[in-house]
Image: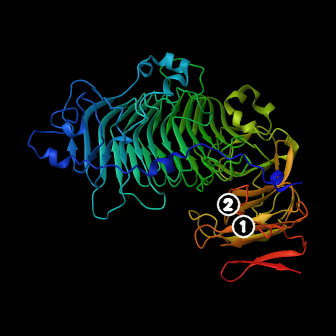
Amino acid sequence: MTIALIFSYNFSVAQNEATKEASESSQSVFYIKEVLQDGKGDFDPWNTQRWSAWYNEKGEIIRQFDVDTSVKFKSRNEPWLVKISEKFTNKSLFTIAKQGIVMDGNGLIMDVRTERQKLPLDELYALKKEPWTDGNELRGIFYNLPQIEGIQATKIKNFTFMGWKRGIKINGTGDQEQHRLIVENCVFTRNKIGFYTNGYNTLLRNCDLFENGYGAIYSGSRSRRNQFIGNTFRDNTLSQNQHSYGDFIGDTFFDSEISSNTFAKSHIKTDQRRIGISMFRNMGESNNLREQMPHNNIIRGNHFDGYSVAIHIGSRMGRDTRNDITDEGRDYAFYNLIADNTIENSTIGIKINTEGNTISGNAFTNVEEEIVLQCVFFKLENTTINYQKDDEVKLWYVTEDYAQYSDWFRFQDDLNGSIKKEEKLITVFSQREGPSFSQNQDENFKLNPVKASGKNLLEDYRLGVPMATATGEFSLDLPGNEFVAIWDQPISRINEKDYYSILFFDDKGTEINRCGRSEVKWKEIAVGYFTKKEGEMEVAAIPAEAIEGKYPVYIFDRGFQVPKEILYGDNENPDITIKTDMNQELMVLFQ
């Protein structure tokens, strides 16, 4: 056994859009306010003479417009066919440079579509990815401004975006509240993605989002406390590129609201996969942890018509991808509320793959599978279902349970094929007007079990209580401290092989991540600050058996299979032990 075998990992070269786009290139700033004071009327950025500093001699735009004042665009009778110079070095056509201003498009259509992106809808569905692999790589409007108290919300309204990489793009750090942004009465169509946010504190309302290539809305890494209310969605995954993409894509977003939206029937009759809302935690990109999990989101009062899956929670559970830095295929999405939605003429209404979510008061008409709970790995616990008394919940354990839909859920059987039904457990809490279930209670399904607490909080139904636990700060966005635990038997099974892993839980006992997947059992763990001074803590672990004759100390960050540092790599003494002192620093002892 070698360390390389135990900690084998294929690092990703994929790019993290949030990180990549957060650091804009150093560019000269060209504000528009001074030019607008020339007395020549409303904002008309297509006027090459008035805005000559932004154009070359060919009438092509060479730099972004930095919007530092409220503007109303001049009325046009036809779309603005934006021409961008090859020497344009910015990433956005417009960047909002001041809090509290209003950008009123006044009905402006900004069109940068390629010829293929103008094709009829049925042809776009048939071509899948092809029309979206090239074309414009800019954002129409970019926003990233910190909160300033006492200033009104910034507004973007009355635009149509066509053909952009992102119609509107919002960046943010995730831990700093941004100045309130309201986007309203806009149309996003034939873009790669209509609206993309990594931001904090945005409201998108009364917008139409239809016929976009990869998705209508992408609420991505670190996005939080955003609202999406009263919008209309239709035909927004034309590329059919990702089994986890839908009209609304929620990737590691939290504390957000999706309510009173309409997810409309397709304008053509198609057998293509259509998902309304898809929620997941990206498993990592460029060796960076997606540290947040989709949690505390509200999906309420929406209407869905004609979907393959209206709402899919934990849609990347089980996925085998080089971006998975834990190398365990785990998705996390918990404490999300799915309530009072109406779903009709659809194949699957609500599908849940992750623990700790609540379903309540949803209405189904002509839906083949109203609610589905899929146990992808060993267990799917703590789903709450109330006020669904006339509905049936299907319990899926193995691929045979959903063979007719397996093409839609390819991620769910990437890594778990050797886990048998008799090894799995689904638990549900339902105290008020509960649904029926596709099977009776047995060893695989428990209805209203006794909730674990105290020393049994982290008990695993197969392996019992952990052999060792520790407490520390492992998620800055969750209340209280978290638990870390190890077992004396393998707790993971990936591709027919059993592994020992270090698991993380919140203070309610919900699993939030893993690290240190290993073929060798862990003997001890300790938590603290070992290579840094603040933020999320680290885990130190020592193996129970020698690795190439050595007993090192491995230092892990949450979510990583590979250790960030190896201490005492030449130690041959099996009587090594670890703990932390009062300053949360590591102490290594030898007997």
Q: Is mark 1 on a helix, strand or loop?
A: strand
| Of 481 and 542, the residue lying toward us | 542
Q: In which quarter of the image is residue 314?
A: top right
Mark carried by residue 392: none
Q: Is 420 situated above or below 584? A: above
Residue 190 visible in the displayed image: yes
Q: What residue is pinned by disc 2?
A: 558
User: Tag 2 or tag 1, which sits nearer the N-term?
Assistant: 1
Q: In this view, does 182 lie to the left or right of 431?
A: left
Looking at the image, which residue is at 63% across and 69% down? 473
Q: In which quarter of the image is residue 250?
A: top right
Q: Which amino acid does label 2 sit on?
A: Arg
| Of 409 and 35, the residue lying toward us | 35
Query: What distance separates the C-alpha of mark 1 from that of mark 2?
Result: 8 Å
Residue 381 at x, y percent in the picture: 73, 52
Q: What residue is pinned by disc 1?
A: 539
Label 2 crowd (10 A; few <14 / some 14-19 / many >=20)? many
Label 1 crowd (10 A; few <14 / some 14-19 / many >=20)? many
Circle 1/circle 2 CB separation < 8 Å: yes
Q: What residue type is labelled 1?
A: Val
Of all residues, the one furthest to the left in this rendering is 39
Residue 52 at x, y percent in the picture: 19, 37
